[in-house]
Image (cartoon, grey):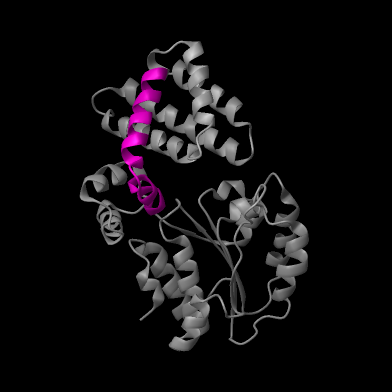
Amino acid sequence: MSLLESVRAQETAVQALLRAREQGRVASAYLFDGPSGVGKELAAVSFATDLVAGDDPHIVDRIEAGAHPDVRVFRPRDEGKRNIQVEVLRSEILPLAQFAPFEASATFFIFPEADISFPEFQPEAANALLKTLEEPRPNVHFILTSERPDSLLSTIRSRCQRIRFARLPTAVLREILEAEGVPEEAIGPAITLSAGRADVALALASDGAVEELTELTRSVDEAVRAAGPGALVELAEQLARRDDLELALLTLQSFYRDLSVSSLDADAGLASAAAARVSLIHECVQSMRHNANRQVALDSLLFDLRNLR
């Protein structure tokens, strides 16, 4: 049995990878793109494990423990802007590719959240990686995962075979939340606001977050519909101090996405305004991920949302 079969509700992506394995046509570089929390990293590690370990449970155990030289996962760093520094890439990561494979017949270098590790606005490390992608060694494979592939250099995207991952259906999210012991009363709201992302659903379902963020969403919506400029500035200040700001904005985005869909038949104008708000929130989240000033970004967002009333 392939470990890829443990990846839930991603039949198209899984079948593409299984065909590549069966036909001996594994690409030198892949880009797994799709929302967060839908199984991209699990699929990357499972695919690599299938090819490196075969049916040997001992090797599977070593890979799962992060102790096999031919399956390596390089995450964004924990501090600063979290991008992988070009010096680290050149001195500690890419030299490994010159000598791989080490024990197995193939080696995999996996970069979760590649758009954070190699942001377009800081291209030094991305260009160093690109040079390796352009001159692939036999049996050395790279897998980049990203929920924002457009934030990667177009030249990197063009060197990777793209595998798309979809949002998770309600039934799968429910099974995940139930397996984590989430109370029944929190499951429905968490799924509704998660927009098909298991990580967001789990975060929403924890410690009363659903209720608090749902109330925050209502407050923000009421403010942008009726509040004056002073109240909006005060609200932006309050939002900027939140540790869970991105989750709060994603919850607000899900609210407007659902409103847009539900209003399509009844009120085209309302649906259009809600869709425009979804886009504005997305742009705000993106700008803050690129280290824009929180206060400035939120001021702009709230006033832009207000102008769409």
- Taking depth in this image into account, of 173 and 5 the one nearest to the observer is 173
Q: Position of residue 302 (x, y in %)?
A: 49, 22
Task: Tell me: residue 170, above or below residue 47.
Answer: above
Give the number of marks: 0
Q: Residue at x 62, y 54 (%)?
A: 78
Q: Quadrant of the C terminus?
A: top left
Q: Dividing the picture into quarters, in which one does residue 95 lie?
A: bottom right
Q: Is residue 82 visible?
A: yes
Q: Is residue 175 left or right of residue 65?
A: left
Q: Position of residue 64 (x, y in %)?
A: 49, 76
Q: Main secondary structure of the magenta part?
A: helix
Q: Is residue 279 above or below residue 308?
A: below
The answer, for residue 24, to whether it is visible in the render is no
In this rendering, would 188 be left or right of 218?
A: left
For residue 153, side relative to residue 201 (left or right): right
The residue sitting at 62% across, 80% down in the picture is 69
Quadrant of the image containing the N terminus:
bottom left
Q: Position of residue 296 (x, y in %)?
A: 60, 25
User: What residue appears at the point 50 percent right and 85 percent down from the top-left corner?
Assistant: 59
How far across and down, in percent of the image, does residue 137 sit?
69, 76
Q: Is residue 102 magenta?
A: no
Along the line of sight, the residue nearer the viewer: 57 or 141: 57
Q: Residue at x 29, y 53 (%)?
A: 169
> Which residue extends farthest front?
207
In this view, 270 is above or below 201: above
- Read off the magenta span: 197-223
Q: Is residue 6 above or below residue 83?
A: below
> In which quadrant of the rendered view does residue 157 lie?
bottom right
- The answer to if 222 sits in the magenta stretch is yes
